[in-house]
Image: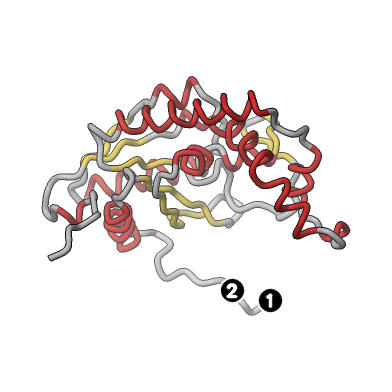
Amino acid sequence: APPSLDAGVASSPGRPIRVGLLIDAFAPVDPDVAATVLASAEALKSLGITVEPVRIPVLEQINALELLWKLQVMETKPAFRKVTAGHEDKIFKHVQGVYDTPDTSIADFVDAEQKAEQLRDGFAGYFQQYDALLCPVTTVPAHAHDAAEFNIDGQSVSSLHVMTATAPLNVTGLPGLSLRFGTSREGLPVGVQLVAPWMAESTVLHLASLLEAVSPVRGLHPDLSAI
């Protein structure tokens, strides 16, 4: 049989699974989001999964969102210019933000790549002790498409802040999965995120299937009567 490239639970079914819970590293986080992530942690615990709060020091030392932006400006701006030529009136604000950001210098690009390696090393150390990471997927519930900023617990942040918990995955190439597990006080969807080591997609798929089976929003469908 061909060798398996799966480094996740599918390669050793039935073994204990350890999950780290991380919320504060992405602060500020909307209270409804934090509560939903905590509820998903309790749900996994009730299913026999070990879940405990963790710290990943490298996330406190390196701003992954700032890093992602520097890399994105260097790597995507030329491609964006090419595909949006002649359609400047239809450019989405995220792309416009890339255009409005000064070009990343070679020195800054090299520094960003080195910091990305440090992030990978930090996660590699974390995953020597844990099988997965449970955290927010966005720091606010579902939001307006054109939002420019958010107020989270009295703190005003740029709309880019919603990517705080996903930027580390984009930079390091870690596999992640998001699923809805709650609803905000305004009735908007709230998701959680599961992250696993490289080549361990089966771990996040397994944990997500467990959460989906006990999700408080399982079977919930949009009300189409107002459409």
Spatial CA distance of label 2 from label 1 is 7 Å
Q: Residues within 10 Å of mark 2 (few under 14, many from 20)?
A: few
Measured along the vertical axis of the image, is residue 35 above or below residue 215?
Answer: above
| Percent of width and height locating residue 202 | 28, 56
Q: Quadrant of residue 42?
A: top left
Q: Residue at x 30, y 63 (%)?
A: 213
Q: Are marks 2 and 1 in contact (CB under 8 Å)?
A: yes
Taking depth in this image into account, of 136 and 172 the one nearest to the observer is 172
Q: Which mark is residue 226?
A: 1
Q: Quadrant of residue 219?
A: bottom left
- Left/right placement of residue 20 relative to residue 108 reads left
Measured along the vertical axis of the image, is residue 216 above or below residue 98?
Answer: below
Taking depth in this image into account, of 183 and 207 the one nearest to the observer is 207
- For badge 2, the amino acid type reads Asp
Q: Quadrant of the N terminus?
A: bottom left
- For badge 1, the amino acid type reads Ala
- Left/right placement of residue 218 relative to residue 224 reads left
- Left/right placement of residue 111 relative to residue 214 reads right
Q: Tell me the residue that label 2 is attached to.
A: 223
Taking depth in this image into account, of 87 and 133 the one nearest to the observer is 87
Q: Residue at x 79, y 47 (%)?
A: 96
Q: Residue at x 85, y 62 (%)?
A: 87
| Percent of width and height locating residue 23 | 44, 34
Q: Secondary structure at mark 2?
A: loop
